[in-house]
Image: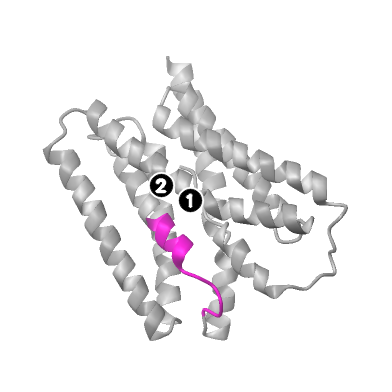
Amino acid sequence: MVNRDLARTIVGIVGNIISCFLFLSPAPTFAKIIKSKSVQAFKADPYLATILNCAMWVFYGMPFVHPDSLLVVTINGAGLFIEAAYIIIFFIYSNSKNKKKIVIVLLVEIIFFAGIVAITLTVLHGTKKRSALIGIVCIVFNVLMYTSPLTVMKRVITTKSVKYMPFYLSLANFANGCVWFCYAFIKFDLYVLIPNGLGALSGLVQLVLYAMYYRTTNWDENESNNEVEISSSRTADNV
């Protein structure tokens, strides 16, 4: 039992490190935004989605919802602050129309999150029922967030080019999914296992596509607008 717990802790720490890298991967995009003092064609949508996803996973990892999930809380807590920083930067350099959209979306997310928390703590009693509700909600969010990588993968197949699907980001996504899948398997946690199994599969497909279309890629091609699509996939979709 001790060895299993130790193994789970070590795997979880590795998962924290990889996930942190993924959370920080959009930093160059925001450096560009700050430098140009404009959000350009970038969208806040993936960051608004990720901040709610992180908040849900932090709540899932609370002792009164799903005990013994400290490492789930630590990485998603870090992700929550990182995504908040991204949104603040995005808000500062957005026009009034985008600022209004960000405020509305955040208000909706706060109301939704508060409602889920209230229902969980007042209606559901016991960690098993609470874990089931929050776990299912988290799985749904994670599955929905896989639409961004799917968009990039579709473009790779259509253009037969992997120029705008960075190899190391795809590798990190694959490793992230595998590590958290193992974490969930060591001390079986279905709600962490499912989304990260899908995340590992998504990363594997990206790596296969990279191998298939690497030779047909025109590396001299210059399409700066595609950076928008890349930034949308640079969020840690998994726990």
Question: Residue at 52% of width from left, 85% of height from top?
Answer: 37
Assess disc 2: are there few (<14), some (14-19) or many (≥20) residues with their C-alpha within 10 Å of its C-alpha. Answer: many
- Residue 145 image label: 1
Secondary structure category for the residue under label 1:
helix
Q: Which mark is residue 113?
A: none
Q: Report x, y in % for residue 17.
A: 54, 45
Asked whether, in this view, residue 89 is left or right of residue 113, the answer is right
- Amino acid, disc 2: Phe
Whether label 2 touches label 1, CB < 8 Å? yes
Find residue 109 and report its horizontal and vertical position in percent: 29, 59
Query: Which element carries disc 2, helix, strand or loop?
Result: helix
Highlighted range, magenta: 39-51
Query: How is colour applied across the structure in the image?
Result: one colour
Q: Name the residue under label 2.
A: 141
The reply, left or right, for residue 131 in relation to residue 156 is left
Residue type, numbered disc 1: Met
In front: 158, or 127? Answer: 158
